[in-house]
Image (cartoon, rainbow, N blue to C red):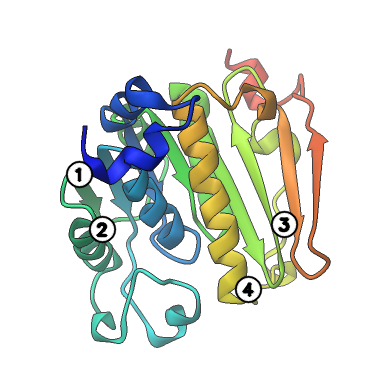
Amino acid sequence: MSIRYERQIKINEIGEEGQKKLKNSKALVVGAGGLGSPALYYLSAAGVGHIGICDPDTVTLSNLNRQILHFVKDIERKKTESAKEKISDFNPELEIQTYDFMVDDGNAEDLFKKYDIVLSCVDNIEARNVLNRAHIKTKTPLIDAGVNAFSGYILPIISGYACYNCVYPTSVPKEALDNSIIGATAGMVGCMQALETIKTLLDLNGDFFGKMLFIDLMELSFQTIEVKKSESCICSTEE
């Protein structure tokens, strides 16, 4: 086992067997931006052996206050190319696959079937609903997160528990959405999203299933609430 992981192998809940499991795991990160950047760094640092990166966009200067995978030299490059370059340099032991297209209902299900777990690091409601529908069809675990200004949330979407539509049954009007963000908020929530992914892959996360974490970094407060599965939701009707 690589000396790179010796400190985490010492953790009782991981050990050598857990590290082997991470090495053989496949995680797809949808969105290589504010959340995806720290999530990708820490998934690769932990030794998740097969990582997919999906993002249709190119790097812009306004991305750089929070999207720490990308540098000034990457402006106008595809985010997938920039992200793969950084992660490959950071940990060359990994296999990395890129997808430089937008996930939609026509391709999401096939993507989900290739991976053991998916991270929703997108920044819009429409994409979250696409990923949620793909989860329902494939039952692939989906770790969703979102950020705004000094706040964020993490929601594990696991088959048999509440899905995204159980929590948010109606779409938020676009004019009501606020895309303000400070980079450290995305960094903290993205790190926690990566940790929840690692715990899920190692079967250490069952106590958090069916719950949602709200994070207020202005007040430095955390609130975990139970989210109920809706009998009228598509995740119940398609079981």
Whether pointer 2 and pointer 3 mark residues with C-beta atoms closer than 8 Å, the reply is no
Rendered position, 39 above or below 77: above
Q: Quadrant of the N terminus?
A: top left
Taking 150 as reference, is 161 above or below it?
Answer: above
CA–CA distance between discs 1 and 3?
38 Å
The amino acid marked with disc number 1 is: Leu
| Mark closer to the chain start, 2 or 4 | 2
Amino acid type, callout 4: Asn
Q: Is residue 221 left or right of residue 127?
A: right
Residue holding disc 4: 179
Q: Along the polypeptide, which appears first: circle 3 or circle 4? A: 3
Please report whichever mark, 2 or 1, sits nearer to the chain's N-terminal start: 2
| Residue 124 percent across, percent down from the top left | 56, 59
Work out how far the residue at label 2 is from the one at label 3, CA to CA, in angstroms.
34 Å
Q: Amino acid at mark 2?
A: Ile
Whether residue 149 appears in this view of the structure is yes
Q: Quadrant of residue 231?
A: top right
Residue under numbered circle 3: 172
Residue at (75, 68) in percent of width and height:
176
The quadrant holding residue 33 is: bottom left
Q: Residue at x 18, y 61 (%)?
A: 89
Q: Residue at x 79, y 26 (%)?
A: 228
